[in-house]
Amino acid sequence: MDAMIVSQIARDVFGTEPLKLERMTIGRMNVVYSVALPEREVIVRMNENPFVLKGTSRNIAVLARMGLPVPKVIAEDLTKERYPFHFIVLGKMPGRDLGLELPNMTREQVTRLAEAIVSYQRQMANLPLGSGYGWVPIGDKGEFASWTDIVCRDFNSGLPNAQKELAPAEIERIEKRLERLAPYLDQVRPVCFLDDVTTKNVMILNGELQGIVDLDCVCYGDPLYMISLTQTAICADIGQADLFYIDELCRVWGLADEQRQIVDFYSLLFAMTFLGYFGDDVSGYRRMLSHIKRWTAALDR
């Protein structure tokens, strides 16, 4: 059914029959198709929820004016008057997600990528502070009253997974670290940052950055969160050898030792939640658990 609708959208927007449709499976929020047309390829993103895509074209316009490499918006319809989905049609960027390309990149290429991503985040930080915390289109009010609320939510979300695997003393160590971080978390301002330019949504071709995609929302809060999510994703899906990218992000960003420890703590919280994603992937589950134990042991330092 989705493919039939995408074909109809392509015919309506471009006046031609698509040559090929490919369902993209990396994302979780939207139904996404790559559509090959006679003269180009485009991306069709669909969602039944009216709020998911409501700010996408606006976000892209803001980022384009800032000079960030973002896809072109070709068409959108958020009414659901003709189709059972809200949809947006975007130009397709060349390359593949960073997670697929990182193991083949040279250290020089990884450094250039880190410099680019940090420069984008610094530009994002120059946008006006948010009126709340969390994930919304640029300029909208976040649903959380504080950054502490988000971090505590993440801890509580992953705790049931961790309790199955960690000793009570290890859980207590994480809880105490969260308590000690309270002064830091409470003073975090609602800074705007790109939250999901991680191992996904960063398009790489021949080792070089082509652009960033999946821009339905930004996050208001602590930009270190993005580095942490990237670190956890690398540990989960690629391997520890590719953590050089994290080292470079931290170095280029100029993080102090205390900030680097916060990155690892956020990564620990992400990893606790990630434990619930592996299904039958026993080796991936054990690999993630080993990182959790390592990050937990380091909390005493």
Image (cartoon, rainbow, N blue to C red):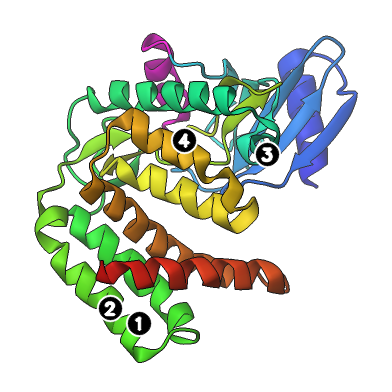
Residue at 40% x, 18% y is 63
Label 3 – label 1 distance at C-alpha: 32 Å
Q: Amino acid at mark 3?
A: Pro
Looking at the image, residue 87 sits to the left or right of residue 16; the answer is left
Whichever of callouts 4 and 2 sits on the residue coming sooner in the sequence is 2
Magenta stretch in the rendered image: 53-67
Is residue 286 located in the magenta-colored stretch of the structure? no
Residue neighbourhood size for the residue with mark 3, other residues' Cα within 10 Å, grouped as few (<14), some (14–19), many (≥20): some
Q: Which label belongs to residue 173? A: 2
Q: Amino acid at mark 2?
A: Arg
Q: Secondary structure at mark 1?
A: helix
**Which residue position holds label 4?**
216
Whichever of callouts 1 and 4 sits on the residue coming sooner in the sequence is 1
Q: Amino acid at mark 4?
A: Asp
**Which residue position holds label 3?**
103
Label 3 – label 4 distance at C-alpha: 28 Å
Which one is nearer the viewer's eye here, 59 or 256?
A: 256
Position of the C terminus by quadrant: bottom left
**Which residue position holds label 1?**
170
- The picture places residue 263, in percent across and down from the top left corner, at 33, 51
- Dominant secondary structure, magenta: helix
Q: Are marks 2 and 1 in contact (CB under 8 Å)?
A: yes
Whichever of callouts 3 and 2 sits on the residue coming sooner in the sequence is 3
